[in-house]
Amino acid sequence: MRVIVTEDYEQMSKRSANIVAAQVFIKPDSVLGLATGSTVLGLYNELIKMYKEKDLDFKETKTFNLDEYIGLSKDNPNSYYFYMMNNFFKFINIDESNINIPDGKALDIKKECEEYERKIKEENGIDLQILGIGRNGHIGFNEPDVKFEATTHKVSLDEKTVKDNSRFFSDINKVPRYAISMGIKTIMLTKKIILLANGKEKAKAINKAINGPITPDTPASILQLHQDVTFIIDREASYYLDK
């Protein structure tokens, strides 16, 4: 495990973007695992800048998103499909057929999860996975007490997660209670992982993930066992690491 502490969000975004760009430079047909949320917006903005400067080509790159809310259509502004299209994909030259995001409106969620997992295996796994972390230590939508052996599956969202995500919705009652998420096993099988975190509200979760016991109570703690994981965090998120 490697921990990079940056001075602020901007530096965190640039450092992480450099790692993603290097992966795509070295292997243009890389398979990237992508996250959503406010933490990774800066990373995507940096990658868009690199693309526009003609330094980065996503033509052969394939992507798999970590998760999607169950019940939201692709054109719903709170869906992760909508987020990815409007914050990243429409600004780069990725082939739309290479974009993979779980279908939250699938009629058979179990089948959708199985098919998503099959597609990942068909690509021989993910080369580089980008993660954020929840205040309760979740990665993807793998909440505390999730089974570490889980592959892509339906999850019930923790009340803390629902409350945290309610800032993106007009009403907390409109926040979906279920989602499709890559499982911990799927994440752990990726070849390389970078986890981003910023802000003091993530500091306790970061400390538990890096220094705490490996336990389902803090899903991100399992990353201590991954062969190639880098935490890129700002100064505020590192608050408890040396205490």
Image: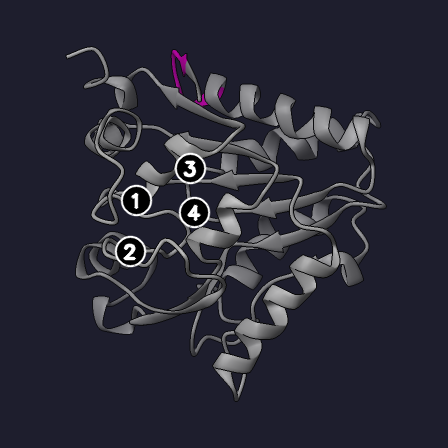
The residue singled out by tag 3 in the image is 39
Q: Quadrant of residue 204?
A: top left
Residue 78 x/y as whole percent: 44, 63
Residue underneath mark 1: 134
Could you say which quadrant of the image residue 162 lies in?
Answer: bottom left
**Precedes in sequence: disc 1 or disc 4:** 4
Which mark, by number, is residue 143? 2
Kindly indicate whether the residue at mark 4 contacts the one at mark 3 (C-beta within 8 angstroms). Answer: yes
Q: Which residue is mark 4?
A: 37
35 vs 236: above or below? below
Disc 2 from disc 4: Cα separation = 16 Å
The residue at 36%/19% (across/down) is 234
Few, some or many residues within 10 Å of mark 4 (<14, 14–19, 20+): few
Q: CA distance from mark 2 to mark 3?
A: 18 Å
The tag earlier along the polypeptide, 3 or 1, is: 3
The structure's colour scheme is one colour
In the rendered structure, does residue 54 fall within the stretch colored magenta?
Answer: no
SS for tag 1?
loop
